[in-house]
Amino acid sequence: VAKMDRREMMGRVVTVAPAAGNSGTHGGSGPDRGREDDRRGPGSKRGFRVELTGLPEAYTWRDLKDLLRIGDLAITYANVSRPGIGVGDYESFEDRERAVRELDGKRVEGCTVRMKILVRAARSSAGCLHVCVRAFV
């Protein structure tokens, strides 16, 4: 932030500051330093991930995050990967299990939402990353 503050870009002086209520470091150093906590990408190593299908096609990541937030459940990431399909991460295994129980099969704006638990797996001996899916039917 300090390096970019008051620099000239495209003929204008730019002011850069951390977001309100944010120190700008998100708790330390390393590869995740400076990323928004609730917008971590698919390579995130934290969180308990679910995939949702059957979402209304106009859904945004904010709509999805609101849907995933049931009561006091902690959502750490939400993204709509393409129309009708999204992913979300919960902070704990228990939060994810509760969300699946309460949201799988729920009708949202005339659409039936289905949830799958995505379980991260280690790389195979050939170096390929495999993701296991546990579907609820």
Image (tube, rainbow, N blue to C red):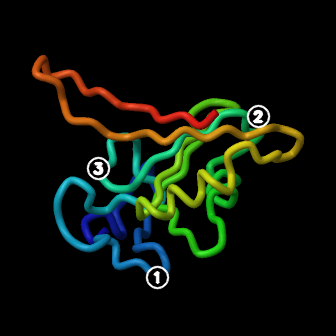
View extreme (front): residue = 137
* Residue at image location 35% in from the left, 31% down from the top: 131
Q: Amino acid at mark 2?
A: Glu
Q: Amino acid at mark 3?
A: Lys
Q: Secondary structure at mark 1?
A: loop
- Residue 61 is labelled as none
Is 102 on the left-hand or right-hand side of 132? right
Is 73 on the left-hand or right-hand side of 37? right
Q: Amino acid at mark 1?
A: Gly
Q: Quadrant of the N terminus?
A: bottom left
C-alpha span from label 1 to label 3: 24 Å
Where does the image place residue 56, in percent across and percent down from the top left? 78, 38
Could one spot residue 13 in this view of the protein? no
The residue mark sitting in front, 2 or 3, is: 3
Residue annotated with mark 1: 21
Residue annotated with mark 3: 45
C-alpha span from label 2 to label 3: 28 Å
Is 86 on the left-hand or right-hand side of 108? left
Is 1 on the left-hand or right-hand side of 68? left
C-alpha span from label 1 to label 2: 33 Å
Q: Secondary structure at mark 2?
A: loop
* Residue at image location 63% in from the left, 54% down from the top: 101
**Mark 1 neighbour class, 10 Å CA radius: few under 14, some 14 to 19, many 20 or more:** few
- Residue 57 is labelled as 2
The residue mark sitting in front, 1 or 3, is: 3
Where does the image place residue 63, in percent across and percent down from the top left? 70, 53
* Residue at image location 27% in from the left, 36% down from the top: 121
Q: Secondary structure at mark 3?
A: loop
Label 1 or label 2, whichever comes before in sequence order: 1
Label 1 or label 3, whichever comes before in sequence order: 1
Label 2 or label 3, whichever comes before in sequence order: 3
